[in-house]
Amino acid sequence: MASFVQLAPGAEENAFAQMLADLVRQNIESKPHKKKDFDAIDGTVALVADDAEVALTLEFRLGRLVVHDGIYGVPDVAVRGSSDAIMTLSNVPLTRPLALPIPTDRPSLDVLRSMVRATRTGELKIFGMFRHMGLLNRVTRVMSVNG
């Protein structure tokens, strides 16, 4: 695994942690323009997939990511919901050059609607979103397979 993305001890047994570490690594390697956002992220994001009974913490430190099993420390942002709702975040449509979540076609609109619906119904909850909007925007851009 690329040295800029690492699994903390114990996280290698968390399939969700491995999958997200691979996703970030592949996004950075295949889309070099995402590296600028990645290098600027300094904060922690906890992801809790209730249906899969699994949690992890993404600890971003200016060009490095350590993925921890479970909740590690006090995260800046916490995302809680079903695994499908959480994974929808990696499909958010992003336009260039600003990398904003603006749908440009029908499938993109469907993904955005699904995310908004999940948030409205409580299937997806994001804590700390307004206080750490910049962090959340950058993490979304790095994790999105689009843009």
Image (spheres, rainbow, N blue to C red):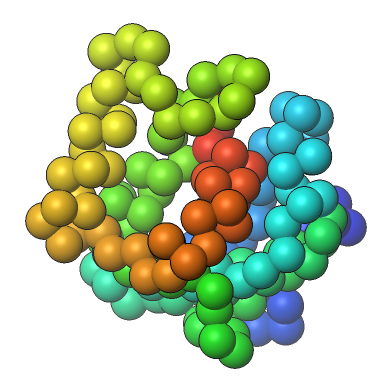
Q: Is residue 34 visible?
A: yes
Query: Residue farthest to the right?
Result: 3
The residue most toward the front is 131
The quarter of the displayed image where residue 32 is located:
top right
Q: Is residue 126 above or below residue 94?
A: below
Placement of 99 over or under 54, stated as above or below: above
Q: Which of the 4 quarters of the picture holds residue 54?
A: bottom left
Of the 4 image quadrants, the one containing the N terminus is bottom right
The residue positioned 58% from the left and 53% from the top of the image is 134
- Judging depth in this view, the residue of 108 and 126 nearest the camera is 126
Q: Residue 6: in sight, yes or no?
A: no
Q: In the displayed structure, would residue 137 be above or below residue 76?
A: above
Residue found at x 16% / y 62%: 122
Count the numbered circles shown. Answer: 0
Q: Quadrant of residue 141?
A: top right
Residue drawn at x 23%, y 43% is 116
Q: Is 115 in front, or is 135? A: 135
Residue found at the very far left of the displayed protein:
121
> What x and y, as percent, mark residue 83?
33, 58
Query: x, y percentage for residue 129?
Result: 42, 62
Image coordinates of residue 43 in percent, x first then y, are 66, 69
Quadrant the C terminus occupies: top right
Q: Is residue 96 left or right of residue 63?
A: left
Please indicate whether residue 91 sits to the left or right of residue 124 in the image.
right
In the image: residue 113, left or right of residue 99: left
Looking at the image, residue 75 sits to the left or right of residue 121; the answer is: right
Which residue is painted at 48% across and 66% down in the image?
131
Q: Residue furthest top?
A: 105
